[in-house]
Image (cartoon, rainbow, N blue to C red):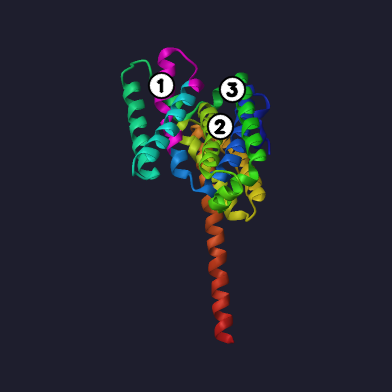
Amino acid sequence: MHQLVSPFLDNPFRQRSLLAGFLVAVACSVAGTFMVLRGLAFLADALAHGVLPGVAGALLLGAPGVLGAAVGAAAMIAGVNLITSRSRLSSDTAIGLLFVGMLGLGIVMVSRSSSFSGDVVGILFGEILGVSRRDLLQQAIALAVVLSIARVFARPFLLLCFDPEQADMAGWPARRLELLMLTMVTVCVVMSFQTVGTLLVFGMLLAPAGTGALLARRVPAMMAWAALLGCASVYVGLLLSYHFDLAAGAAVVVVAVGMFFVVFAVQSAQQAVSGRRADRSAVAA
């Protein structure tokens, strides 16, 4: 029992990392639930990678990385809207082009600086064990923004996810709603990259929400499951990183994805057993 709590008892760095991870998990669970229901996983992945040139440019200029991440995400969303509105290309094509282009631009910017190697590791994989009180405050503000948007626009978001035409008829233009939903996802990406990194924040958006979708049929229950499993993955991941000397951010995401496949395997096994029982009952009848 002592080994389960000892890493967090007398270590303020790990206490802050645990709290920051919980804040990220809850924010990503709320935004990720709508993202999964709407089918925006590819765009969210592109956003998570598209912030790289913005963050790199900000650090090269001596500006805050969060500001650069916001600029990069805004450029990604604006570029997708511009291409889809002024050409015959699909949104998937526009997202793919900008995803590859911005990721490549970020790598080029990084490669031009010989003193960037340490910062790049932090950008890509996060520095969850180096979270400061200021980072905690920023993450708490981001969580408040995400919860506020989700609460105020819960019904329109549900209409958009399940029946976009009904959302238009109810006076909620689907295009504007989707932009607002992307803004919520962007807030999670921008504020969470410092904790789990740009490569791993997508996992926190997708894995707990995907697991919640397997366990629940109602949206509030999906969010609750996602938040619970997200926080559990943060705790277990940090615990494993402490005892086995693993990369903390990566361990958290691996645990979150592992939980999804465990639930998926258990449900698949249950369905197979139920199917065999139904076949036997039909044969006996």
Q: Can residue 222 be seen? A: yes
Which residue is rendered at x = 61% and y = 34% of the image? Answer: 146
Circle 3: residue type: Asp
Q: What stretch of residues is rendered in magenta?
A: 46-67
Q: Quadrant of the C terminus?
A: bottom right
Foreground label between 3 and 1? 1
Q: Among all residues in the image, which is located at the extreme top?
A: 62
Circle 3: element type: helix
Per the image, the residue denoted by label 3 is: 135
Vertical order, 141 against 204 (above or below): above
Total numbered labels placed on residues in the image? 3
- What is the C-alpha distance between the residues marked 1 and 2? 29 Å
Residue closer to the observer: 121 or 139: 139
Residue closer to the observer: 109 or 182: 182
Residue 273 percent coordinates (x, y): 56, 70
Residue 33 percent coordinates (x, y): 58, 45
Which residue is rendered at x = 50% and y = 35% of the image? Answer: 201
Vertical order, 148 against 161 (above or below): above
Per the image, the residue denoted by label 2 is: 242
Which residue is rendered at x = 57% and y = 38% of the image? Answer: 28
Chain-order first, disc 3 or disc 1: 1
Do residues under tags 1 and 2 come within 8 Å of each other at their CB atoms? no
Q: Residue 95 colored magenta? A: no
Circle 1: residue type: Ala
